[in-house]
Structures are given as structure tokens and as C-alpha cells.
Amino acid sequence: MSQHPGVKLLREMLADSGLTGGTILERRAAMDASAANSPAPEGTTVTTGELGGRPTEWVAPVGLGDDAPTVLHLHGGGYCMGGHDTHRGFAGRLAIAAQARVAVPDYRLAPEHPFPAALDDALAATSELLSMRPGPEHTALTGDSAGGGLAVATLMALRDAGGPVPAAAALISPWADLTQSADSHDRLDGLDPLLVREDLDQMADAYLAGCDPRDPRVSPVFADDLAGLPPLCIEVGDQEVLLDDSTALAALARRSRIDVSLTVWPELTHDFQIFPPEVVPESDASIEAMARFIWKHIGD
């Protein structure tokens, strides 16, 4: 078991949080309740609107111009929970680090809205954002956990439609294989306080609703190739069951001759970037690395 002090603290904090175990609706309620612990950081503004017909929250550094680079973030939550309120703090930290406007749309959730609802919503929101100023060359796509896998599926859908794609994408612990068949599910089982296989299986069943889990639109690691996608940055912990999703996705990107950066953080667990640096100091370092990658590809 990891000896990282921040992970030890997370284990204590999450033990009775309701975020693991129980029904999807119970975990959704627990995640929604946690939103109060994720306010936008000082120095940011928060506005609401719509993208692709879905409620969307924009977080930006105070005083940032309208022509600043933009980022669309697809939130995690196993396709069954989460929203812009649960990811407001993370979005604000990324906005400050990247000096960009970050949009977080609320895509529809399973089991009420199974596949392809989330992909349809993400595609519509991203397409609308790309049609706005400052344009595709100054726009990036990001996602954490399920949102990371959804981000890759969205990029492939944009590519296949023949339209513009964002100039870069940064992924945090992407859930890119809904079969849960990778070796890391057994090798690292029990190390992560936030993510367990039983919960993943439950959420995958709810989202798939009978769809083949090897369909690349839900599990991008099974795509023939990623040719035509923009440069990718992947950040993951070495103590999480989704580790092999990240390494497989990076390997597929390399075979597809896509520029990909993969960072595996030692002793860290799933989605550690969403937790405050007071608990996991590396969360800031990872966000800053993502921001540098994003700025390299979409900044002036």
C-alpha cells in the first residue's frame, strides 16, 4: 500500500464519504455534496451559459481578455455523476495555470442517459466552442477519468466528421477501457482510496446499456489508430487501477505517430489533481505541467 502521506490522508477523508460502494445514485449524491469543498479559487471569475445545448460553467482568471486561449474540460464521475460544480475548483486552478478560459459542460449522465448521450453532448459542446473565438488553433480539450476517455472519443468523432479539432488535449487518468480487463485492475487492486473495480463495473454497465465495451467510442484503446488527433498529454498515478488505460492509450498514440507525453506519478492514486495541494502537493505540479503543454500548443 502506498506510503505517500497525502494518499494516507485521502484514505482517511474518503473512508466515510460515500464516494465508493453503494448504488450509483448514492455515490452521485455524495459527489454532489462534495462540491462545497471545491470552490473556484481566488482570482477567478465564474459565469454560466450553454455549449451544445448543455448547461456550462466558464472559469477564468480575473481580467483575462475575451481572445484568450480556451479549454473545454470534460469532467470525471464514471459517466454517472459529477458536473461543473464538482470540478469548479480544478477548473479554476487549470485556468490560472494556463491563463485560459475553461469551460465545463454538464453532459447527460447514465443510467438515465446511457451511451451515446455523453458523447453526443461532448461533441456538440466542443464543436460549438471550436466555432467561436479564438478558434481551434487556440483551443484545447481536457478531461479527467471518464472525461478523459470521453475526450479521446470526442476527438475521434471530430476527426471522422472531417471538421476542425482542438490544437491539443490533456488527459488525467483517462478511463479508456470499459472492459476492466487490463492487468492493473488486479495488480493494483486495493491501493486506490477513490476507485475500485466493482464501482467501475457498475458504472460501465450503466453507461454501456448493452453496447459492446470494446467499441472505440466508449473504449478508445481499441481504436485502430489515433491518426489525425492533436498532441496528447497524459497524467496518471502509478497506484491506480486505471494505470494501464493510460499506458495503452499512450502506446496507441505512438503507433499512430501522434505526439504524446505520458507522466506516471509515483505513489499517487486516481485523479489526484482534483485534490488541493495542501493534501497532495503534486496536484499543483501536475496541473502546471498540463498548463505548460496546453500553452505550448494553443498560446500565442
Image (tube, rainbow, N blue to C red):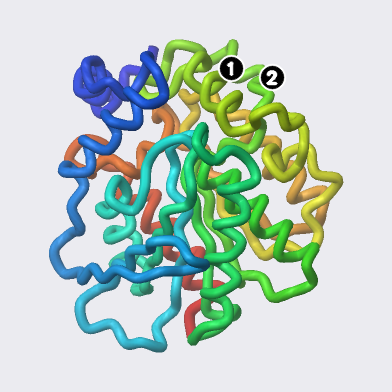
- Give the amino acid at mark 1: His
Q: Is residue 246 visible?
A: no
What percent of the width, then of the height, locates residue 264? 52, 37
Identify the residue at horizontal 73%, vertical 74% (top origin). Answer: 163
Element at label 2: loop
Q: Residue at x 70, y 36 (%)?
A: 248
Tell me if residue 24 can be seen: yes
Total label count? 2
> Do callouts 2 and 1 mark residues in contact (Cβ within 8 Å)?
yes
Q: Position of residue 252 (x, y in %)?
A: 76, 44
- What is the number of the mark on residue 185? 1
Bin the neighbour count of mark 2 within 10 Å (Cα to Cα): few under 14, some 14-19, many 20 and up. few
Crowd band around label 1 with a 10 angstrom C-alpha radius: few (<14), some (14–19), many (20+): some
Q: Is residue 227 left or right of residue 231?
A: right
On the image, numbered disc 2 is attached to which residue? 181
| Cα separation between marks 2 and 1 | 7 Å
